[in-house]
Image (cartoon, rainbow, N blue to C red):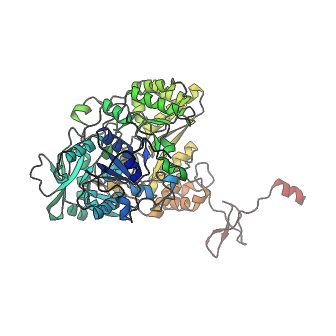
């Protein structure tokens, strides 16, 4: 088994590289996949490019102290991440039931990382190495950097910096801050004195030297008063931009503060290109082959990342807190060079699966001033209406896609990451929309209207339903003109804050009129550091301080979900209950506008005479038994 080119994951591999003591040891909850879609690959390759040696401990046994010491104590520090996902999202469905598999683990095996993995790994390191610097990063650390609501324990938690006993958080994407941290440590600066790097969070008892910072409500005050947490969150939300964000200070008992420095500046196109030009092996470590590899690679192996950041501002999404609202892009040359590498892969069949990012059709900041003055603190680019300063232009993306389509060996270039349809409609030139329909869809286009009730959409930070309707009609018109038989697959969400049974029924009626029943429905999932999660926890919309309805009861959530899939016979009882509870029994009947038929009536023998085909047991008070046998023409003829 050759591992040439991969970073060391065993002591033997470390010694083969001539390393006696690594500068850093990177601990991750994921399997080691050396591909730029994985955060640990980017950070370790960047450090390597700056002259630092890095070894990787992938999915250590958190119950065994020896698992964290296979490389000894690193010269400069440990870097710790839960992986590409928050470990709790990785482990649990929204119902809090365990997921049966893990795409980021060899063979898809579940249970190879602990709950709250960043905290557990760091405490394991602290037991073995008392004074070594620990820097945490990745999405789990980034989105839990300040006090936050944890859905899985239904509790209000402290900053992960305190619970993990780490020294620093490198939040966001981390390419700039991690190099500055490494250089500071390498120059002899003690980790407790590293308080000056953008994109980091540190702890201190001395805040006298912090200039122009904002003191947030203390952890204890927020724990006692949810309204104060909602207010604190909006201050944080308004300070996520490197150009106009301020330092934020959150107080804890004993005079301790967690201090968040403003974010790192966004990467320039040249810097983005440099990140993606690093010598990635573009696959998982060969030691995982015997277990069948790492399933997650199949989703990204033949896809291209063209951008990062998102000015869409959906309230249930944490991108504002992690990647920021300023869109950063790679050059065409960089993307085409990576495409050439994909084409050379022996498994490539001619299909590039995706060219995009958080939002595929964002290829520039939303307006010119963002790169000098930052994003607006008090308004969104697309919500509730597109900003007058919005520059909606798909020309650059269009040229990129045309170049990719023209590459020898490429049969088709698909777009599978999200298309922001309101931004698409804001572009007065239909050329991109037409070419999207003609060349870049594999039979169906997935889009995310999320709901149809304008009241719920307002809570989501999404455009009103009329915008989606315009998009849907235009999509159909273009398909008809081009002779295509392609469909729209709308992502829909149930139980989002603000959604009552009334709105859930409205959504079911809309789907009835479309003649569409989605195969999958996503219940709202309260993940850390989103506006919607703050609504869920506090019952307050932090944007205006007003109360908002929250669907928390699992049975009520099940009814909302069932209404979206009202045609599924398994959902009949839930739909019946929901319609009755909502006062919409007019939707139970035989009219074409009805969602379900009434239950079968029974004769005096207790057998079904009409309705949904199940017998009614009066003694038990519920529907039971097999469907009554219908008389067929053949049976009638027999009797004759």
Question: Left or right: where does residue 211 sit relative to residue 35?
Answer: left
Q: Position of residue 327 (x, y in %)?
A: 33, 35
Question: Left or right: where does residue 71 sit relative to residue 554?
Answer: left
Q: Position of residue 369 (x, y in %)?
A: 24, 30
Q: What residue is at 42 percent from the left and 42 percent from the top?
A: 37
Please name whichever residue, 591 or 177, is drawn nearer the observer in this view of the structure: 177
The quarter of the picture where the C terminus appears is bottom right
Please name whichever residue, 196 or 474, is drawn nearer the observer in this view of the structure: 196
In the image, farthest residue toward the left: 208
In the image, farthest residue toward the right: 640
* Residue 355 visible in rendering: yes
Q: Position of residue 584 (x, y in %)?
A: 51, 56
Please name whichever residue, 602 or 53, is drawn nearer the observer in this view of the structure: 53
Q: Position of residue 500 (x, y in %)?
A: 43, 56
The quarter of the displayed image where residue 65 is located: bottom left
Please name whichever residue, 36 or 446, is drawn nearer the observer in this view of the structure: 36
* Residue 430 visible in rendering: no
Q: What residue is at 47 percent from the left and 34 percent from the top?
A: 471
In the image, farthest residue toward the bottom: 619
As displayed, is residue 551 above or below residue 391?
Answer: below
């Amino acid at each position: 088994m050759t591992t040439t080119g991969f970073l060391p994951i065993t002591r033997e591999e470390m010694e083969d590289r001539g390393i006696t003591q690594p500068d850093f040891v990177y601990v991750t909850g994921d399997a080691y996949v050396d591909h730029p879609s994985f955060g640990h690959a980017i950070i370790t390759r960047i450090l390597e490019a700056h002259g630092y040696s890095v070894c990787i401990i992938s999915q250590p046994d958190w119950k065994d102290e020896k698992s964290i010491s296979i490389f000894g104590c690193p010269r400069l520090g440990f870097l710790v991440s839960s992986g590409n996902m928050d470990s709790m999202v990785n482990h649990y469905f929204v119902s809090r039931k365990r997921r049966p598999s893990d795409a980021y683990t060899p063979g898809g095996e579940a249970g190879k990382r602990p709950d709250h993995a960043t905290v557990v790994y760091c405490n394991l390191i602290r037991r073995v190495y008392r004074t070594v610097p620990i820097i945490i990063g990745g999405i789990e650390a980034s989105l839990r950097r300040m006090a936050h609501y944890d859905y899985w324990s239904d509790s209000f938690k402290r900053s992960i910096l305190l619970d993990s006993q780490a020294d620093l958080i490198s939040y966001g994407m981390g390419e700039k801050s991690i190099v500055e941290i490494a250089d500071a440590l390498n120059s002899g600066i003690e980790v407790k004195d590293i308080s000056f790097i953008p994109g980091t969070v540190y702890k201190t008892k001395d805040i006298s030297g912090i200039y122009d910072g904002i003191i947030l409500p203390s952890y204890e005050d927020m724990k006692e008063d949810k309204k104060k947490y909602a207010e604190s969150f909006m201050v944080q939300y308004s300070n996520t931009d490197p150009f106009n964000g301020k330092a934020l200070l959150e107080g804890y008992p004993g005079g301790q503060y967690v201090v968040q420095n403003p974010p790192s500046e966004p990467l320039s196109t040249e810097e983005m290109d440099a990140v993606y030009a690093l010598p990635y092996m573009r696959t998982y470590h060969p030691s995982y082959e015997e277990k069948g590899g790492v399933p997650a690679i199949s989703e990204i192996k033949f896809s291209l990342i063209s951008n990062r950041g998102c000015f869409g501002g959906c309230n249930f999404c944490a991108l504002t807190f992690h990647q920021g609202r300023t869109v950063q892009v790679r050059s065409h040359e960089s993307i085409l060079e990576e495409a050439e590498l994909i084409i050379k892969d022996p498994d490539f069949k001619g299909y590039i699966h995706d060219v995009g990012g958080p939002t595929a059709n964002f290829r520039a900041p939303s307006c010119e001033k963002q790169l000098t003055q930052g994003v607006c603190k008090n308004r969104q680019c697309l919500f509730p209406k597109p900003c007058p300063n919005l520059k909606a232009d798909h020309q650059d993306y269009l040229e990129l896609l045309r170049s990719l389509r023209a590459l020898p060996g490429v049969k088709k270039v698909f777009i599978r990451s999200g298309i922001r349809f309101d931004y698409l409609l804001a572009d007065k030139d239909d050329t991109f929309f037409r070419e999207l329909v003609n060349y870049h869809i594999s039979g169906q286009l997935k889009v995310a209207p999320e709901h149809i009730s304008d009241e719920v959409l307002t809570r989501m930070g999404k455009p009103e339903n009329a915008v989606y309707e315009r998009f849907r009609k235009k999509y159909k018109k273009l398909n008809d003109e081009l002779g295509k038989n392609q469909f729209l697959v709308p992502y829909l969400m149930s139980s989002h804050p603000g959604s009552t049974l009334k709105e859930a029924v409205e959504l079911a009626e809309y789907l009835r009129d479309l003649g569409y029943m989605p195969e999958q429905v996503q219940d709202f999932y309260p993940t850390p550091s989103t506006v919607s999660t703050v609504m869920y926890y506090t019952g307050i919309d932090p944007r205006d301080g007003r109360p908002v309805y929250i669907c928390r009861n699992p049975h009520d959530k099940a009814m909302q979900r069932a209404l979206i899939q009202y045609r599924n016979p398994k959902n009949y009882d839930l739909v019946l209950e929901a319609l009755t509870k909502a006062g919409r029994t007019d939707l139970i009947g035989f009219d074409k506008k009805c969602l379900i038929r009434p239950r079968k009536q029974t004769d005096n023998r207790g057998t079904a005479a009409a309705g949904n085909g199940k017998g009614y047991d009066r003694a038990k008070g519920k529907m039971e038994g097999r469907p009554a046998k219908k008389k067929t023409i053949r049976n009638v003829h027999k009797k004759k």
